Image (cartoon, rainbow, N blue to C red):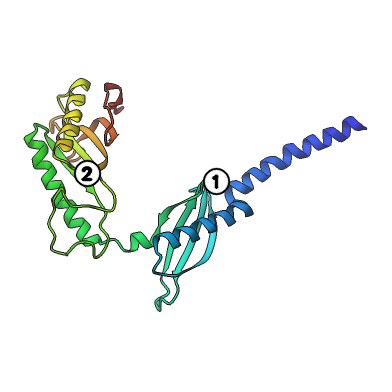
Amino acid sequence: MKKKKWLYIGLLIILIVPILFFYQAFNGDPVSKIVAKKTLQSYLTEHYPEQEYRILDQFYNFKISGYTFDVIEIGDEQQTEYEFWVAGFFRPKVTYDGIYYANLDEPLMERISNEASADLTTVLNEAGIKTVNIDVQLEILQGKYDKGIEWSNELEFENPMYIHLIIDATNMNKEEMLVAVRTIQQTLDSKNFSYSRISVNGNIIDTSTIGKDDSGYVKYYIGFDKGNDIQLSDIKIEKQ
């Protein structure tokens, strides 16, 4: 009888544990829910001390392994709702701030981004890098700069820039691609460009062998953070 009893207990454990695991994976648990809400309350107090906010609905978002919250500003006649994400079990933190993104100056960001791309194109072409396209992602809060401000690498953004480049690597081998990427890194560092990360695609641009689009086909690719020591093994080869 004892053996059967322990056998039944063992079977129950085998059945219940996966159910609890999947339930938590898709719904969270009461403790983490409370902790996530307190984390958001502290974040709002710290980052927006001059306003008072009310946390409305919340639900477990399994895609981020955390909670999504809706927040409104008390006294706001429009009752605009802002979305927040809080993720992390042992050290939960806010990973998405809807108030921050709602206050970004999108038109100014787009114009300054285009001006930065043009400047980077000139700087890198002078350094011997044949650029095909440069995309710059930057963030500027409304009211930080006058609408007429022009691009300068001395401008301070909310976060360092993310830069994506496509260069002509049609006739490059892997070693030559490494030299080109190091030249990009050294040139931007010497010119005091503030960036967090750069990604580079080395593409095949020869129009006699491709017909996909003006940017060609990816041959090599790499991403590196500010200050990384770039090695040959960091250059990845795109499988055709």
Disc ID at residue 166: none
Along the line of sight, the residue nearer the viewer: 100 or 13: 100
Q: Quadrant of residue 78?
A: bottom left
The quarter of the picture where the C terminus appears is top left
Regarding residue 204, the answer to whether it shows in the image is: no
Residue 163 place in picture, x, y as percent: 23, 43
Residue 81 visible to the viewer: yes
Q: Residue at x 27, y 33 (%)?
A: 227
Q: Quadrant of the N terminus?
A: top right
Q: Give the alpha-carbon distance from disc 2 to disc 1, as whole Å.
A: 32 Å
**Rendered image: mark on residue 194:** 2
Across and down, in percent, residue 23 comes to 63, 48
Q: x, y (%) of residue 114?
A: 16, 52
Q: Do labels 2 and 1 touch, CB within 8 Å?
A: no
> Relative to residue 198, is residue 88 drawn left or right?
right
Q: Residues within 10 Å of mark 1 (few under 14, many from 20)?
A: some
Type of amino acid under label 1: Phe
Q: Is residue 63 above or below residue 208?
A: below
Q: In terms of image quadrants, where is residue 212?
A: top left
Residue type of the residue flagged with mark 2? Ser
- Mark 2 or 1, nearer chain start: 1
On the rendered structure, is 131 left or right of 6? left
Drawn side of residue 49 relative to residue 230, left or right:
right
Q: Is residue 6 left or right of residue 101?
A: right
Q: Which mark is residue 89?
A: 1
Who's the residue at 48% across and 48% down the image? 64
Which residue is farthest bottom? 77
Q: Residue at x 11, y 42 (%)?
A: 121
Helix, strand or loop under label 2: loop
